[in-house]
Amino acid sequence: SDLSHIRNFCIIAHIDHGKSTLADRILQLTGAVEERKMKEQLLDDMDLERERGITIKAHPVSMNYKAKDGKTYQFNLIDTPGHVDFSYEVSRSLQACEGAILVVDAAQGVEAQTVSNTYLAEEQNLAIFPVLNKIELPNAQPEVVAQQIEDLLAIEASDCLTVSAKTGQGIAEVLEAVVARIPPPKPGVDSSARGLVFDSKYDAFRGVVVYLRLFSGSLKPGEKVRMMGSEMDYEIKEVGIFAPDPTPVKELKEGSVGYVIANIKDASEIQIGDTMTSARHPAATPLPGFKEIHPMVFAGIYPIETSDYEKLGKSLDKLKLNDAAFTYQAESSVALGFGFRCGFLGLLHMEIVQERLRREFDLDIIASYPNVIYRVNLKSGETLEVDNPTMLPDVMQVQSMEEPFIKATIITPTDCLGDMMQLIMEKRGEITHTDSIDAQRVMLTCDLPLNEVLIDFYDRLKSISRGYASMDYEYADYRESDLVKMDILIHSEPVDAFSAIVHRSKAVYRGRQMCASLKDVIPRQAFSVAIQAALGGKIIARETIRAYRKDVTAKCYGGDISRKRKLLERQKEGKKKMKSIGKVNIPQEAFIAVLKTK
Ligand code: GDP
Ligand code: MG
């Protein structure tokens, strides 16, 4: 079939450089969305995305473009997230495309994710063309930024287009450049259907919706298809494209991007990266899948109401379908009851998953302290992987411990370089390279323990640089480290949800911090309560909550009965949301507050 009219591309950029806005303009100019239906950030359809102004999921959309050469082209555009935690979404989208528009804010210049996303696109051999955005801003410096792109990314400065996604200036040229600079799909090796599953979504009415890029052959309703990895067969009910809403078509053709609905009931049946083929004429070999991704950060997620346990399990199952990087398995905690150990790519990813559970699945949940995976080398010669402090074997059995390190790229203004280096040192990091970008900015390459980055590294980096520094990282290796388990005891009871594995040099500081924030959130009880941090049997920090006799009805002078009853009811309501640790009642908010503020 003729593929010369198809262009599959994505937009990559550092966060806030204008990917979604550019996508909006492209949709508008090609007439994919009627003027009256146009709203800002059209593709960020998740509430959470709209509120936070960030793209979390990759969004595919198809449109027709009538070019200056008189021909009509089919554009398949995939908008991608920019945040480091979601780079797996980016690399998946890239694999479904032949080209990428690299958007760079002409006022801000090249940032950390500009660099990392360009590398990802180059790894996939995509045609990349740079677009300088926001040129209508008075402080835009398109020439300077074009030179940065040439110096740092080895993409010729003269290749840059200049646009304003806000005013629409230059967008028509971008559309022409998509036609001219991005190659059409290569024809498939044969005519057997091969669709790369790059995403999927669960629909309550129609089951699993599979997002795919068809590299060869075609798919039609009524056909029997097979998932090559799981070897499961299904009958196609509907195929369609995103225009931008899911729109059924008669046939999905070679080279295009679209969706398949095939009576797939269970979320877990679809593996992202699997190849969909025809069951009658299966392809000889599957498409190369995606690089497997491994979660780096682990935390327990527990229902606040014990009776929600099953619902939580089912929700996680559905969420996983839409989020390939997320993992979970059942676990239990003395303090929190039955829940799930969940794996995430980073803290933002963890926050987003929790938020989605609350909103999309209407669940009240609580998460334990996040941990990385530690390697524990035992004296017996065995090596354990531990992502939960409570699973740490007895110190007597342990020979040594290792922790994961990342390689980080940090771009920082030169005037706060000193503070930035101080922060990296404090976090036990080591700077391996410094490259100057221009007179104002420096790119630092450094090795850092992932564990330290989890806590507050990103916030500190932002505040030191007044928001101007950016960072990206990739996993590097494991290194031996002097690590200890820190327990938190409340009224002499260890609370497993608060245990943490920390570097010995940080234990006292973290112990004090933890005790102090717990003191702030645990209400006074009828007796005095000690909050302690301990390494083995040794107490390293302590706070005390003094006793307090709480008599809520005292203010009512024993007079107004109905008012008194109301108060008691309210108190009972409050109790329901408490978890008791030994004799002490701790409000849910305390767990949340403490686990959040590190
Ligand atoms: P994304 O994170 O890369 O998807 O970036 P967005 O498209 O969400 O844009 C980030 C912010 O930049 C939003 O507030 C946009 O309104 C704004 N923005 C996007 N393009 C332009 C532009 O050309 N000029 C100006 N002044 N602002 C823009
Ligand atoms: Mg966006």
Image: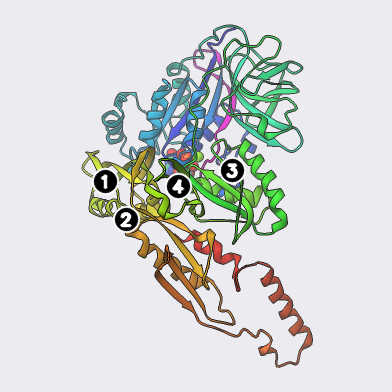
Instruction: Tell which tag, 1 or 2, sits nearer the viewer.
Output: 1
What is the three-letter code of the residue carrying label 2? Ile
| Residue 53 appears in the picture as rendered | no
Residue 307 or residue 351, whichever sits in front? 307
**To which residue does mark 1 refer?**
430
**To which residue does mark 4 refer?**
372
Q: Earlier in the sequence, mark 3 or mark 1?
A: 3
**Rendered position, 129 above or below 390:** above
Q: Which residues are magenta?
A: 54-72
What is the three-letter code of the residue carrying label 4? Val
Residue 291 or residue 217, whichever sits in front? 291
Q: Where is residue 472, by image quadrant?
A: top left
Q: Residue at x 29, y 48 (%)?
A: 429
* Mark-to-mark CA distance, 3 and 4: 14 Å
Would you say the residues marked 2 and 4 are in contact, meaning their CB atoms lie under 8 Å apart? no
Would you say the residues marked 2 and 3 are in contact, meaning their CB atoms lie under 8 Å apart? no
Q: Specify the farthest residue to the front.
A: 380
**Image quadrant for the C terminus?**
bottom left
Residue 134 or residue 233, whichever sits in front? 233
How would you rate the neighbour count of disc 2 (Cα within 10 Å): few for under 14, some for 14-19, many for 20 or more? some
* Mark-to-mark CA distance, 2 and 4: 25 Å
What is the three-letter code of the residue carrying label 3? Tyr
Instruction: Tell which tag, 2 or 4, sits nearer the viewer.
Output: 4
**Rendered position, 34 above or below 187:** below
Instruction: Tell which tag, 3 or 1, sits nearer the viewer.
Output: 3
**To which residue does mark 3 refer?**
328
Q: Where is residue 473, by image quadrant?
A: top left
Q: Position of residue 52 (x, y in %)?
A: 53, 49
